[in-house]
């Protein structure tokens, strides 16, 4: 398949590297400098003590010509490309975002085949052309409404053993499962500037962690909260030495995805009381504003 990947952060680099094994991939970058570097040096994947480089084509122009597009930009960057996607001829577009804020754009893209997915890989962008695969996982994908599934079938059929794609029938469930993890682990670790594992080992943080989970689960109407809490704790334990993406964004003075995670939940709370969510949302927004020097 010919695949265009829009977004050249950690996930964009990671997916470009692995999907280039069996597909013709073009990575779309925001900066010409990064595109030139990738065209010259390829993309280097670091995993453990191993480094592998693959040739990948890159472009900084928004001439998205491929019949399959994978969107890996962060939620707050979607506004800059939605108009372009809306004007494209029909094709398959796969969204891989944290949170659920991108759902509001989908009605504008109804002429495309839309696939919603979540990535459970850990990745860290080392430089413009180097990505560290910090944790192997899976990519869950699901059709949005009724559309063709040939692209999904090809991704699953041609998948690498170390980079699998799994089809799920209910897109809302997989997005909620990812959202509940992002909404509990990310804001707390960003506020307290701790690795994920501290939420389990520090009894005071752990109490807040559970109370926040309860509030999030109630808003998302999670039916089996006991199972969901076990899953969240397992992910936290498996990534205990990791810094969450929101922690890294705060540390590096970057904008976070708090609006599409906790902001989305507050917007859809129907004015139901959610004091912990509201506090964390305001706290992270305040830190962001402080980093901007306002």
Image (cartoon, helix red, strand yellow):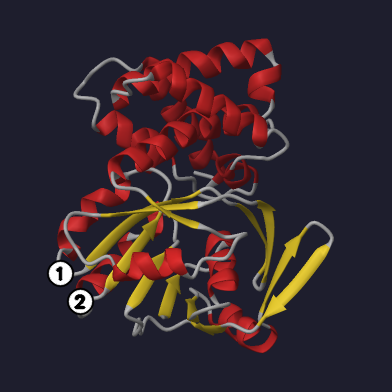
Q: Residue at x 58, y 82 (%)?
A: 56
The image position of residue 240, as x and y in percent, is 69, 33
Label 2 secondary element: loop
Q: Residues within 10 Å of mark 1 (few under 14, many from 20)?
A: some
Among the 4 quarters of the image, the one containing residue 35:
bottom right
The image position of residue 227, as x and y in percent, is 45, 21
Quadrant occupied by the N terminus = bottom left
Is 209 left, or right, of 100 in this rendering?
right
Among the 4 quarters of the image, the one containing residue 3:
bottom left
Q: Is residue 21 visible?
A: yes
Name the outermost residue toward the front. Answer: 157
Residue topped by disc 1: 111
Is 167 left, or right, of 235 in this rendering?
left
Name the outermost residue toward the right. Answer: 49
Q: Residue at x 34, y 18 (%)?
A: 274
Give the mark, 2 or 1, whose residue is nearer the N terminus: 2
Along the viewing direction, whichever of 115 and 258 lies nearer the viewer? 115
The image position of residue 73, as x and y in percent, is 44, 61
Label 1 secondary element: loop
Label 2 and label 1: CA atoms lie apart by: 6 Å
Q: Residues within 10 Å of mark 2 (few under 14, many from 20)?
A: some
Q: Is residue 189 visible?
A: no
The image position of residue 145, as x and y in percent, is 18, 54
């Amino acid at each position: 398949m010919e695949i265009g990947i829009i977004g050249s952060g950690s996930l964009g680099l990671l997916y470009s590297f692995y999907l280039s094994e069996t597909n013709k991939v073009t990575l779309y970058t925001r900066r010409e400098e990064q595109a030139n570097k990738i065209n010259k040096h390829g993309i280097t994947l670091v995993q453990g003590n191993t480094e592998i480089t693959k040739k990948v084509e890159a472009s900084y122009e928004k001439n998205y010509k491929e019949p399959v597009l994978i969107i890996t930009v962060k939620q707050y960057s979607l506004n800059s490309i939605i108009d372009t996607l809306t004007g494209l001829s029909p094709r398959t577009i796969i969204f891989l975002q944290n949170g659920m804020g991108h759902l509001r754009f989908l009605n504008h893209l109804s002429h495309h085949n839309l696939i919603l997915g979540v990535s459970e890989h850990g990745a860290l962008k080392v430089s413009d052309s180097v990505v560290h695969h910090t944790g192997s996982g899976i990519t869950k994908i699901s059709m949005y409404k009724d559309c063709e599934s040939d692209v999904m079938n090809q991704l699953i059929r041609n998948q690498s053993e170390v980079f699998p794609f799994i089809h799920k029938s209910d897109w809302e469930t997989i997005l909620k499962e990812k959202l509940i993890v992002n909404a509990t682990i990310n804001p707390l670790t960003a506020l307290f500037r701790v690795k994920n594992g501290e939420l389990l080992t520090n009894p005071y943080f752990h109490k807040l962690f559970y109370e926040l989970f309860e509030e999030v689960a109630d808003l998302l109407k999670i039916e089996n909260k006991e199972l969901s809490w076990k899953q969240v704790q397992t992910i936290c334990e498996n990534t205990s030495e990791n810094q969450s993406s929101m922690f890294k964004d705060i540390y590096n003075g970057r904008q976070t995805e708090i609006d599409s995670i906790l902001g989305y939940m507050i917007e859809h709370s129907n004015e139901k009381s959610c004091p912990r969510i509201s506090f964390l949302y305001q706290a992270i927004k305040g830190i962001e504003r402080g980093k901007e020097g306002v």
